[in-house]
């Protein structure tokens, strides 16, 4: 009877040792923690050497599966982060290239605008000078008056009067130039307002 009782004791929280002393049996949580402890793993690695460890117990298989899952997730996150950084760097380079292109285009446009304004100002100044010179011209003297002369080849009785005249007057020229300048300025403003805006 006593031997039968001793044989039934291992089913409880304690287990017998070879010396007959009762030792408390480890719980499942303690066994899992000990299986996952790094000291146990290092001791096993140092004892086994280069051999590959294979999970044997359900606890080792569980923790091995969790470790593999964590490593897979970490590698996926790292790869995704690298891809995102590569895409962002490529997009930043493209944005810088577009910005540089627009800056150079605006500089050329500013030079063309300045040259056009200078040419327009010079033309207006020349026209104003011509108008002022034509109004300030002194009256013609007697020697510069229209002359009458006879052309004997055509007819002995025919006479020709010579006048200094122009087909287009100076006022008409001024009006045409001003209208052209206004139209050119309007076209330029329309082109500026409808050109593609700068990307930020």
Image (cartoon, rainbow, N blue to C red):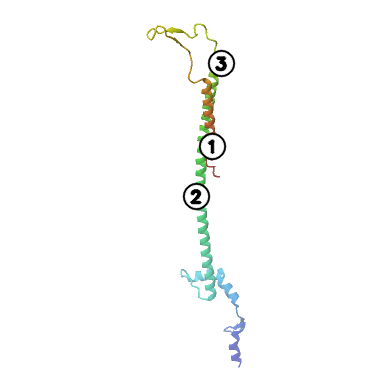
Cα separation, mark 1 vs mark 3, equals: 38 Å
Tag in front: 1 or 2: 1
- In the image, which disc is placed on residue 135? 3
Which residue occupies the foreground of this view, 124 or 11? 124
Q: Earlier in the sequence, mark 3 or mark 2?
A: 2
Residue 196 in the image, given as x and y percentages of width and height: 52, 42
Residue 4 image position (x, y, % from top left): 59, 91
Q: Is residue 194 visible?
A: yes
Q: Image height check: is 12 above or below 120? A: below
Q: Is residue 21 left or right of residue 82?
A: right
Residue that badge 2 annotates: 90
123 vs 5: above or below: above
- Closest to the observer: 41 or 143? 143
Looking at the image, tell me whether mark 1 or mark 2 is earlier in sequence order.
2
Farthest front residue in view: 157
What's the CA distance linking mark 1 and mark 2?
35 Å
- Residue hosting label 1: 190
């Amino acid at each position: 009877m006593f031997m039968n009782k001793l044989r039934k004791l291992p089913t409880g929280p304690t287990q017998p040792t070879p010396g007959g002393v009762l030792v408390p049996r480890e719980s499942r949580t303690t066994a899992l923690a000990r299986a996952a402890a790094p000291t146990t793993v290092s001791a096993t690695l140092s004892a086994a050497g280069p051999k590959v460890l294979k999970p044997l117990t359900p606890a080792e298989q569980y923790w091995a599966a969790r470790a593999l899952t964590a490593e897979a997730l970490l590698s996926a996150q790292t790869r995704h982060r690298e891809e995102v950084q590569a895409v962002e760097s490529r997009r930043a380079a493209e944005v810088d290239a577009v910005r540089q292109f627009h800056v150079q285009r605006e500089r050329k446009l500013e030079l063309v605008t300045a040259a056009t304004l200078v040419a327009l100002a010079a033309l207006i100044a020349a026209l104003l000078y011509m108008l002022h010179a034509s109004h300030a011209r002194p009256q013609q003297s007697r020697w510069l008056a229209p002359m009458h002369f006879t052309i004997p080849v055509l007819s002995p009785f025919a006479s020709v009067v010579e006048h200094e005249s122009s087909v287009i007057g100076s006022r008409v020229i001024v009006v045409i130039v001003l209208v052209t300048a206004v139209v050119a300025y309007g076209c330029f403003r329309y082109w500026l307002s409808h050109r593609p805006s700068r990307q930020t």
